[in-house]
Image (cartoon, helix red, strand yellow):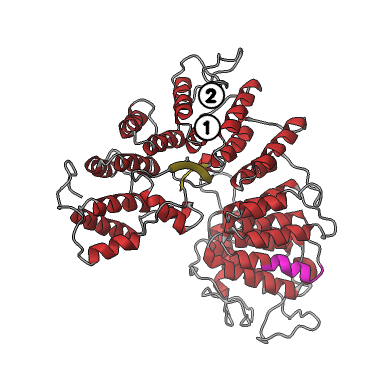
Amino acid sequence: GGSRGNNGGAPMRPGERIVAALQKVQVSDGVERLSWEHDDTTGVGQRLTRDTTEVSYGTIHSAVTKPLGGKAKFSAPTLNFAIKELGERGDFNRAHALFLWMRAQGKGVKKNPGYRDRTQDRTGDEPGNKYAPNRHTLASLFGCASDKAHAKTVTRVWKDSCLLDPHEFRNSEVASAAIAALARCENWPAAVQVWQDLGDKGEPRNIFVYTAVLSALRDAKRWEEAGDVFRAMRDESGCSPDATCAGLTLAAFDGARKWREGIALAKRFGDVYGVVADERLTHSIISVAGRAGDTVFARTTLDKALQNRSHVVTTYTYNCLLGGYARSADWENANSTFAELLQGKFVPDAYTFTHLISAAERAGAHAEADAVWARATEVSEKKPGIGSFGSTGSNLGAKPLCGLKMPTFKPHTVMCGAYVHCLGTQGRWMEAEVVVERMRSVWGVERNAAVYNALLGALLRGDKIAEALVVFDRMQGESENVLPTEITFMLLIRACVENGFTQKAKELSRTRDALAESGALENDFSKYESRDDALRNAHLFSPGGNARFNDSSDEGFYAAPASERSNYHSATYDEDENKRHYDASAVTGRLSAGLPPREKEKGPRGSGSY
């Protein structure tokens, strides 16, 4: 009888006993090598290997052969199970130590022709080693890797195993596991190198290898490498580009903000690469085309999806197109697309109205933006009546379509932020304050830093500096606990300097520096295509400015929850390039130089202490 389980039930299986015994072994965090000396207690003469760790061979040997004090019968699959189980428990170092024990059980050295053992002490796996690792062993071990520090071990094991037994280990199964592990370890160059190793040796690379390496490049936003890998698929024997790989490639371009280059490749998916688009790829193409400003291609892609009965078109599909129209300030096409959405019996959601508000505001159709907001809040509050929106001659105030299912969503943070921004560009700061207040009191919607930045901009545009400082204080209170961002400080410091509040500007600057040093300051400048674009928008709400709402980023100012941010655009700001620039260094230089304020220093009313 084996040892009983933790609940005193059935006896533990050998693999479970080995795992339990290994978890009692002390293993250092940085497992790089496994060194052992001759151990008389085991009766086995040990050799120093290239792979060494701080754990003695005798300790690992005892835990494997006599787990929990009793002998156990086991085989290589049992040890593979133990490695996988250790990985699921986060014990990569112990899993690696067990792998090294398995590889060291032969008494001789197995060398490949032409391979020179540089250490002269590498231990190989002889045919007689019944515990020799196989491809499943490496797949289990690589599945355990999750930390950046594990990448070095994964790379070394991959290279050494391919040298020791290329027939067993140099294949797509092991390579895809290694690439996926290196992607989790955030080491995309090593992942690409594994993919390249297979190609250099003439080994076939299957769809799983390509999916793994493209996933790594997508996460790393390496668009050029992703494009090269995707193009190589066309020449790969027995492997053709599919919608999944095409979507991963396009996502890498999207993450790197190379939208024009990405859409140029996407236009060749069908005729050049033979990719049959599915719903997910269709959404990606429409979204990236909109961000690239190619709304004609985005519309064509949607039309093809509507004509293809195998495609499932949803509200989200239309939202992708509406996002492109919003970015292009094309209110007319956005409105007509919304009417088409309603005619198709699709149910609009908060993001549908967000894009409509954005398109109207950017096009200067503020009355239409107000109409969209009014209808959206009517829907959220379950009031009757919904139609499409427009100016004279379109569908503003149209009667509700018969049979239209009424959505019952509540205004989302993104939607509210878009409308607050719209109000701010018009100097309607009082209405912006009402919307922000109703977010909490009426709809129970979270107010994030982006919403507060929009409100601050509206107040500063209305020359309400005292009120803006009160909002700055309130957003950090116990009830809100929203940390200010780079944009927050940029708006307030500039306003204080230009209005002569140099002491307040210095206090804000010190607060900003303290947050930056602690790592708590969000750099929301990264939402722009360049830092110059971000600096221009620091004076977004200055009198006479021409600020606009723009949903061009997946991680925009009006950030949705993480679960939704992957599916929808968020909002950023944009502004005409002929507006004057404002550089943060100008503020710092003015303060440090001790220049006199533009008007007599006076403390803003209601500013509180900061």
Residue 457 occupies which quadrant of the picture?
top left
Answer with mark 2 or mark 1, whichever residue precedes in sequence: 1
Q: Main secondary structure of the magenta part?
A: helix
Mark 1: amino acid:
Leu
Q: Can you say whether 135 is above or below 559 in the image? A: below
Q: Is residue 447 left or right of residue 287?
A: left
Please tell me the numbered disc located at residue 389.
Answer: 2
Q: Which residues are magenta?
A: 193-202
CB under 8 Å between discs 2 and 1: yes
Q: Secondary structure at mark 2?
A: loop
- Taking the magenta stretch, the answer to whether it contains residue 131 is no
Residue 143 occupies which quadrant of the picture?
bottom right
| In the foreground, 317 or 590 | 590
| In the foreground, 547 or 32 | 547
- Residue 542 placement (x, y as % from top left): 34, 46
Q: Can you say whether 218 is above or below 473 in the image? A: below
